[in-house]
Image (spheres, rainbow, N blue to C red):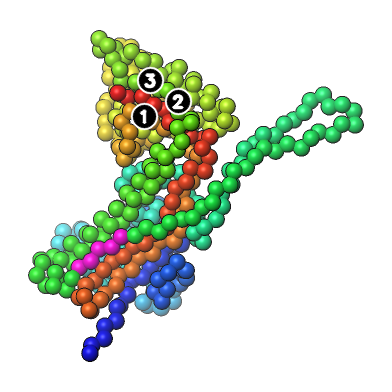
Amino acid sequence: MSSYTKKFENPIIYNPVDHVIYMDDMGKLDDSYSYRNPIMNAKSYSLAASAKQDDPLRVTENFYNNGKEETNFSDIANDYYSKAIKAKETGDRSLAAAIITSKEYTLLQDTVLLGTNEETIRTGILGSLFQEISTPTLTGKYRAFTNDLVYFTNLAESKSPEPTFGAATETTISVPKHGGAVAITDRARQVIAGADAIYSDLISKLQLKRALSESIIVRTAIEGIAATNDQSGVDFGARTSMLSTTNPVDLWTTIINFFEGKQRDFNSILSKAFIYNEYINNDIIRGNGTPLTNQGSFNESSGPTPALNGVTWYRDNLMSSSTNMFVFDRNAAGKNFRGPTRAYTVTDPDTETTKYVTKSHFDCVIVDGTAIARVTAVAA
């Protein structure tokens, strides 16, 4: 009788507290975590990768050396990026393919994929909409405070003021686990041309699926708020005889007063992209007789709101509604809670497969329902 042992390769784990990706201890596949041999700072790497650099090897400064050749990841990264730059400069596709499929760099490549998408959400913008709070223990409590301090006037002699404070709401946080995997069989490697490159591409797409999943989690939290704060909107794009028939100004006055009554700031709007397009081409906003504002996709982007000082409009077609939008205090309404993210490759001789696995802990919670409202009927 033959015995088979699964082999774990390239185990890595992201620590949400220090933003560093470490080598993982695959002796534990439960929700207890240990961190050893730092590989890369995911946060600083993402910033460096997205910035224009005179020296493309500067990104290697975000990797760590650990005193041994096999764990000196800064040296490995320098070698990897140097070869990649040479392949790009010479146009040598065979060299580029060899780098991509090289077993010497698989740990590094997996780390880069995890790191790049950990800090830069490439599918939608909702995943980075709210402040992120590290939740390494996966459970805890979040408190939101309401300031209701009173400063008394004309106190009587010998009369001490009564203490005031306000109230606090406490939300219990339990961060759920999510995950995905892709696999390739030994036979596929033999009969499919470029099978390893296809497999690597699927791993990249899996990270994008993770980013999309997190955006959907945020969308679900926002759209799931109670309708008690609903505000009646106006159809920004309504027109008669080529002229807008609605005036958004009165709506903004209502929204501003709503948030002031809640002691919150009105600083954010979220909707599908076309609703923003209709708003900026409303005649009251752009001015009668002014040429139409250039149309654009505007999807997965954000920017200032014309006629509303200090309010950012977030546009993402991932939102479900084509008629409503959401207004909120971005600093108070919601929080993203992130626990560890781990990834590894497992080789199983019994099933003749190699499987790449990613598991993450993430949740979005509307922690202050007074700081967000749905505005209805802003589009037909």
Query: Left or right: 181 with respect to 327?
Result: left
State whether residue 86 is above or below residue 375.
below
Q: CA distance from mark 3 to mark 1?
A: 10 Å
Residue labelled with disc 1: 324
Q: Which residue is mark 3?
A: 234
- Please identify the dominant SS of the magenta region: strand
Stretch in magenta: 180-184
Callout 2, which amino acid? Gln
Q: Residues within 10 Å of mark 2 (few under 14, many from 20)?
A: some
SS at circle 2? strand
Which residue is drawn at the image coordinates 76% and 37% (left, top)?
163
Could you tell me which secondary element the residue under label 1 belongs to? loop
Image x and y of residue 233, in percent: 40, 22
Q: Is residue 81 visible?
A: no
Q: Nearer the viewer, residue 138 or 204?
A: 138
Question: What mark, if any, has residue 231 been given in the picture?
Answer: 2
Q: Residues within 10 Å of mark 3 (few under 14, many from 20)?
A: many
**The C terminus lies in quadrant:** top left
Mark 3 lies on a secondary structure that is loop
Specify the quadrant that holds the N terminus: bottom left
The number of discs equals 3
- Amino acid type assigned to the residue bearing label 1 in the image: Asn
Identity, as a three-letter code, of the amino acid under mark 3: Val
Q: Out of 307 and 171, give the one closest to the viewer.
A: 171
